[in-house]
Amino acid sequence: MNEQLFTIALGINEPVYIEEITFDKAEGELHIYLNFRRGGQFACPECGTLAPAADTLEKTWRHLDFFQYKCRLHMRTPRVNCPEHGVRLWTPPWARPRSGFTLLFEAIIMQLAKDMAVSCIAEYVGEHDTRIWRIINAYVRNAYSEKDFSNVERVGVDETSSRKGHRYVTIFADMDTGNVIFATPGKDAATIAAFAAELPKHNAKPENIKEIAMDMSPSFISGVADKLPNASVTFDKFHVVKLLNEAVDTVRRVEQKVNPLLKKTRYIWLKNPKNLTATQVQNLGSLANENLKTARAYRMKLTFQDIYREIRDKDVADIAIRKWLSWAVRSRLDPIKKFAKTVKKHYDGILRYFDSRLTSGVMEGINSRVQEVKRRARGFRNINNYITMIYLVAGGLEIVQPT
């Protein structure tokens, strides 16, 4: 009766049958031993042709737990003698080739991996984390290889850290779907080359990319120019405003050396007026009457932000930015003048925003999910495992699992 029950539960069919079931009380493990009928034929894993067994190989698979006990399947697994492909190890319907786990066990692992650190999963199921990573990597790798990028035209690129010590991964995302389409170690021009080389594997070409949003990294700029010839570059507006905020803060730090009123006011100048607290609004009003260089730089920052916020037409934005640059050059504020030079150097990419309307919003959302994975795992020693998790949580993958 026990053999019949487990035969139904495991979905075992002839010529395979359950030969014996034992329970190891000391180890707390259930062992199910499978065998096959003499003369049974099995499908060649290469072509599916039925062929007799040439010999056998002892194999063991970890299965779903039986209540609180580990369960393992054991079988003299046949090696079939295919007329076309020769001797091949038969792949049982309950497991992947070269896997020590059943498909149902792996399905549970993949579900847990979306919300748990792999080290916690390994402890929970009583397996070494290296074996758990093999499962996750295999499913993610297979799902990613099936992705089709033929419709991808607008891409965002940004780097994220994998752990302390400035180890970086560069992430590429489809700006229309919000899915990660490529991730690779580093943050230099080679990452762009690696992305361009990956596209043909997914029914796409580098020439298909029409728009790319990124920061002003010289490496990214040279990489795009070399490997993505049809891509128009949009420099992220939040990155541009961040540089302007840094310029304003530099003005403040220099001026506070001669004017103590500016001490402990850093966040007043970095925030927009609507985000200030009541106390900060009051302090800003008082400081505005002091004829400060910092206050002048702050007003220039707000004016520049208004160009992004209020103008929709590219030609109008062109006129407004040029007018602002003229003001900046005459400002006699060196950090602001330095920022103006940066804008002039990257002018086309900054102005491109008013056509593409691309921002880092998509990338920030992805980075938020990725950082949560990193926090949960307390960092990743293996950067390839980190990339696997990026694809799993943000790649929009269709993981095919048994039902």
Image (cartoon, rainbow, N blue to C red):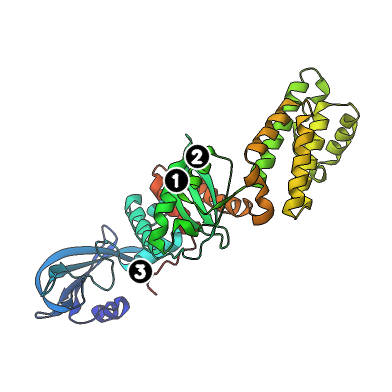
Looking at the rendered structure, the secondary structure element under dot 2 is helix
Q: Is residue 321 left or right of residue 107?
A: right
Between 85 and 205, which is closer to the camera in this rendering?
Answer: 205
Q: For residue 253, what is the image quadrant?
A: top right
The residue tagged 1 is 191
Instruction: Tell me what residue is drawn at x 86 percent, y 38 percent.
Output: 281
Where residue 88 sits in the image (x, y, percent)? 15, 68
Give the Cα separation between the discs numbered 3 and 1.
37 Å
Q: Are marks 3 and 1 in contact (CB under 8 Å)?
A: no
Q: Which mark is residue 219?
A: 2
Where residue 195 sits in the image (x, y, percent)? 44, 51
Instruction: Tell me what residue is drawn at x 76 percent, y 26 percent.
Output: 333
Q: For residue 44, what is the image quadrant?
A: bottom left
Q: Are marks 2 and 1 in contact (CB under 8 Å)?
A: yes
Q: Which mark is residue 104?
A: 3
- Classify mark 2: residues with Cα within 10 Å, few (<14), some (14-19) or many (20+): some
Instruction: Tell me what residue is drawn at x 89 percent, y 26 percent.
Output: 290
Callout 1, which amino acid?
Answer: Thr
Where residue 133 sits in the image (x, y, percent)? 36, 53
- Classify mark 3: residues with Cα within 10 Å, few (<14), some (14-19) or many (20+): some
Give the Cα separation between the discs numbered 3 and 2.
45 Å
Between 294 and 358, which is closer to the camera in this rendering?
Answer: 358
Callout 2, which amino acid?
Answer: Ser
Mark whose residue sits in front, 3 or 2: 2
Mark whose residue sits in front, 3 or 1: 1
Callout 3, which amino acid?
Answer: Leu
Instruction: Tell me what residue is drawn at x 37 percent, y 59 percent.
Output: 141
Who comes first in sequence, dot 3 or dot 1?
A: 3
Who comes first in sequence, dot 3 or dot 2?
A: 3
Looking at the rendered structure, the secondary structure element under dot 1 is helix
Between 235 and 36, which is closer to the camera in this rendering?
Answer: 235
